[in-house]
Amino acid sequence: MNKRNKVKQLNRSADHRKAMIQNMVISLLRHERIESSVAKLKVARSYAERIITRAKRNLDANLANLDEQKKNAAILHNTRYLYSHLGDQEIVTKLLKDLANRYAERVGGYTRIIRLVNRPSDNTAMGILELVDRKTQDELKAEAKAKREEKKPAKKEEKPKKAKKEKAAASN
């Protein structure tokens, strides 16, 4: 009997389940949207919500009543906790700098599950897990375009080069 056991087993061993959920949460935080079965998404959602709440603890408003030494210790502890649970420095940085500020005013409910049509092969309920205030595709494209334009070096004037070529052709 499976009494008093709140862990959704998902027909996997504990290590496999932990790795799968961790990978799903990392993908969610990286892409801000993932697609999977609803049962897996429900488990990943609870884990992701706890991770985002932990990241919010590093905000200044939550650490205002601590002295400087305890504040630094709390920030270090939360950062190490996130890194130990996610294992990806890029995601931890995004979580602390972008997502924690985005959800600073929100008390909970950072994610939502949108149900899709059942998978035809085995009739499994499918869904999309996404962050609530995520950027739209158009906003992401505009940001990428702006970054590309910033990286481009200033174009050199081409008119003087043409004039030099014409002079060289005229002298020959």
Image (spheres, rainbow, N blue to C red):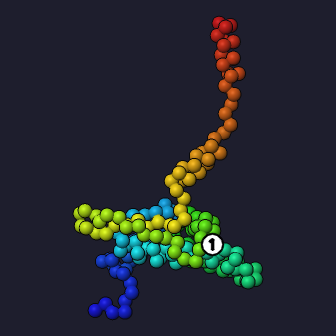
In front here: 112 or 161?
A: 112
Residue 1 position (above or below residue 96)? below
The residue sitting at 63% across, 41% down in the picture is 152
Tell whether 44 sits left or right of 171: left
Label 1 crowd bin: few (<14), some (14–19), many (20+), radius 10 Å:
some
Q: Position of residue 82 (x, y in %)?
A: 56, 74
Residue at which label 1 appears:
104
Residue 83 position (above or below residue 165)? below
Q: Quadrant of residue 98?
A: bottom right
Tell whether 148 sits left or right of 71: left
Q: Position of residue 78 (x, y in %)?
A: 61, 77
Quadrant where the N terminus sits is bottom left
Q: Amino acid at mark 1?
A: Ala
Q: Quadrant of residue 74?
A: bottom right
Tell whether 60 sits left or right of 1: right
The residue sitting at 59% across, 51% down in the picture is 143
Quadrant where the C terminus sits is top right
